[in-house]
Structures are given as C-alpha cells and as structure tokens.
Image (cartoon, rainbow, N blue to C red):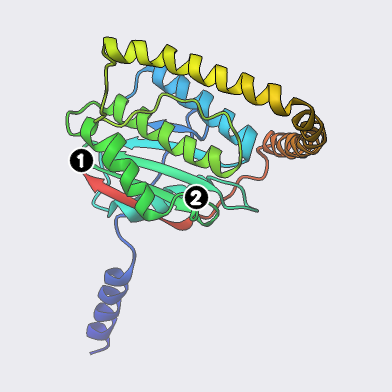
C-alpha cells in the first residue's frame, strides 16, 4: 500500500512539474537582434543594431527582434514574454522594453511590451502595425522586409512618445495609395504660390510695424521654450547612453498574428 501511495505521489509530482521549458540562447552580440532562424541579411542585422542603439541612446527604451524556427510547442505570447524577461529588455526603472518574436515554423509573429511602453504601444496599435507592416510580407515569406518595416514603425512610435524628432524612417505599409499630378496640377501649384505671395506682401505693407513688435516679443518666448526642450532632450540622451540599468520585467501587453 505504501508503495502504491509513493508511486502515485511521484506521478503526481511529475505531472505537475513544468514541461517544455524554453532554454533561450545566450546573446550572440547585443540585445537588439537574435536571428536564430537565419532570415535576415547581414546588412539588415547591421541596420537593426544601428537603429536599436540610436533609439536606446535617445530614449532609454529598448526594441529587440527574435526570429526562431520553432516555439517548441509554447504559445507565442508566453514565449515572447519569457524571452523579454529572460534578456531583461528595457530598463529596471522604466520597464520600457519591447520584443518582436517571429516563428518561421509556426508562422506566427508577436510583439510583447513592458509596462513602460503599454501606453505608447497599446495592443490595438500593435495589431494595426502588424496588419499593415508585417503580415503582407510575411505571408510571402519576405521576412526581411516584414521585420524591417515593422521595426521601423515601432521605432517611430516610441521616438514620438519620448518627444524625439529623429523619426524620418522609410517604414512603409505594404499597401499605399499614390497620386500622380497631371499637367493642370503642375500649373495650379506655382500660380497659387504667386497669389499667396501677393497677399502676404499686402498684409506686411499694411501691418508691418505692429506685427514686427509683436513677433519680437513672441520670439523671445519661443526661444526660451526651445531652449528648455533642447535641455530636456540632452538630459535624455545622456541618460540613455548608459546600458548598465537593463532588466525590464515586461508584462505590459502585446499582440500577435498568424501568417
């Protein structure tokens, strides 16, 4: 009887023990890219590292990519969150990390965010970015284009939230509307400029003295405000230069798609 109880207890323990625990690889070079599935070119990896370093230095936020051949039977949301915590993406103080996970074998993509980026990248916005920038490419197995465009779209959202204006990236959704001006448009544009120029000249002639005095006062206020913004940006940049405070715990949210 005791032997039966012992065997049942052992079986119960084994059944309740965690199975399929993911063993994440050590970082190859840095925290920004783990291309285990080998879907990116060396040039794409180099650009991701440059963008990741640039974003972190300016904002302290960390944006990383992980491409794997398989999720090893684990739900992708759990896999991404565990990886985000395992690598400590984001700072301990702000928990402002985000991780994009792509599984080529399972054909799934998921973006997991820390609490510090939850308001910047809410689930709905993440889903919109995935639908517009990632899925159309991933469905065609164009992993490089899908990853790069999605990364740049996330980069721009984070940069804007930190009031950092270096957001002129060529992240383009897969479907766009384009318009080509005809000859009539080419004529209307310069004619409109001429009309506007005449109107401005008349206004300056009539009200030049009063406007000049008002602008002089406002210019001083604008200069002071600009100086404060510049000082704030410098403070963020110097804070982002140190990467010793890594250790975000994730948990903010995320969204994913099958492709």
**Residue under pointer 1:** 107
**Residue under pointer 2:** 120
Residue furthest front in the image: 206
Q: Which residue is painted at 22% across and 84% down in the image?
A: 4
2, above or below 247, in the image: below
Q: Is residue 254 left or right of residue 106?
A: right
**Residue 236 placement (x, y as % from top left):** 70, 39
176, above or below 187, in the image: below
Q: Secondary structure at mark 1?
A: loop
If the image is split into quadrants, where does the C terminus sit? top left
Q: Is residue 58 left or right of residue 219?
A: left
Q: Foreground residue, 36 or 213?
A: 213
Q: Is residue 4 left or right of residue 160?
A: left
90, above or below 173, in the image: below
Is label 2 or label 1 in front? Answer: 2
Residue 33, disc: none
Distance Cα–Cα, label 2 vs label 1: 26 Å
């Amino acid at each position: 009887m005791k032997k039966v109880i012992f065997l049942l207890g052992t079986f119960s323990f084994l059944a309740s023990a965690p199975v399929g625990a993911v063993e994440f690889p050590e970082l190859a070079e840095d925290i920004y890219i783990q291309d285990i599935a080998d879907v990116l070119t060396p040039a794409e990896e180099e650009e991701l590292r440059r963008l990741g370093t640039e974003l972190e230095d300016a904002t302290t936020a960390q944006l990383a990519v992980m491409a794997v051949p398989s999720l090893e039977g684990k739900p992708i949301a759990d896999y991404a969150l565990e990886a985000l915590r395992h690598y400590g993406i984001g700072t301990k103080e702000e928990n402002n990390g985000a991780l994009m996970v792509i599984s080529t074998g399972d054909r799934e993509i998921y973006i997991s965010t820390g609490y510090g980026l939850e308001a910047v990248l809410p689930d709905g916005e993440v889903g919109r970015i995935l639908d517009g920038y990632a899925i159309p490419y991933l469905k065609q197995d164009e992993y490089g284009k899908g990853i790069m465009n999605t990364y740049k779209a996330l980069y721009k959202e984070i940069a804007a939230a930190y009031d950092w204006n270096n957001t002129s990236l060529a992240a383009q959704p897969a479907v766009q509307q384009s318009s080509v001006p005809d000859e009539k448009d080419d004529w209307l544009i310069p004619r409109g400029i001429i009309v506007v120029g005449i109107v401005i000249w008349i206004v300056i002639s009539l009200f030049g003295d009063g406007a000049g005095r008002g602008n002089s006062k406002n210019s001083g206020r604008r200069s002071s405000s600009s100086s404060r913004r510049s000082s704030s940006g410098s403070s963020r940049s110097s804070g982002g230069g140190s990467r010793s405070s890594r250790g975000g715990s994730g948990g903010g949210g995320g969204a994913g798609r099958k492709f």
